Amino acid sequence: RDCLLSRGLGDVYKRQVFTIYPILWTIRYCMFDYKGYGTPKFVGFANFARIARDTVFKTAIVNTFVYVGGKLLLTLPIAFMLAFLLSKNTRLNATGQSIIFTPTIMSSAVMALIFYLLFNTYNGEINRFLTWLGIIDENVNWLGVKYAMLTCIIIAAWGGIGNYMVYFIAGLTGISTEVYESAKLDGANAAQILFRLSLIHISEPTRQEAIS
């Protein structure tokens, strides 16, 4: 009991030192005018007031929410469907899991090169494919201001689907086979098993992944 108590107090202490203290120190530091040299000058909430009037800061906040929301809306459903299809322990599913997880461990430089070749305005494969289908008549500047956010969301989703898929597979494999067998005996079809059984059992991992 004493060992558990001391370990708990140690965890609280580490949380205060490595989490709470840096946050409080940052808030305090925001109340000073400091350019990296010289003596900091206390200005109170003047920095916060200046940020509130800054249109660039407001645009950055909006772009952040759009990026995060778009990534989650694209990544989580695809990752869950892939996890549901590949959750059974077979050799084919293991190969599929490895292929889908590969972008997660791929270096940023390689990922940037791949998507530059895909979304390049002049000779990118995306523009070539869309032109061949007759969807577009002229090349689209995917890396420009108009479509930059969409491109970033697609790249982020491609790199994160494998990671989320692994979490979903861990949650799905934790569901007892007896639960699925009982549902089938009660006449549940595939859609009902998916939405009324699997999703409910992994709702907590899904919430944690969305927050992370």
Image (tube, rainbow, N blue to C red):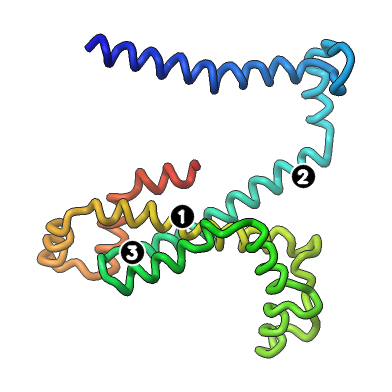
Tell me the CA gap for discs 2 and 3. 38 Å
User: Which quarter of the picture shows residue 109?
Assistant: bottom right
58 lies left or right of 211: right
- Asked which secondary structure carries label 1, the reply is helix
Q: Where residue 126 sits in the image (x, y, percent)?
A: 68, 78
Residue flagged by tag 1: what amino acid is it?
Asn
The residue where tag 1 is placed is: 163
Of tags 2 and 1, the one toward the viewer is 1
Of marks 2 and 1, which one's residue comes earlier in the chain? 2
Residue beneath the point at 49% across and 59% down? 161
* 154 or 107: nearer the viewer: 107
User: Which quarter of the picture shows residue 125?
Assistant: bottom right
Residue beneath the point at 37% across and 46% down? 205
Residue beneath the point at 33% across and 11% down? 6
- The label shown at residue 84 is 3
The residue where tag 2 is placed is: 59
Crowding at mark 1 (Cα within 10 Å: few <14, some 14-19, many 20+): some
Of marks 1 and 3, which one's residue comes earlier in the chain? 3
Residue flagged by tag 3: what amino acid is it?
Phe
Of marks 2 and 3, which one's residue comes earlier in the chain? 2
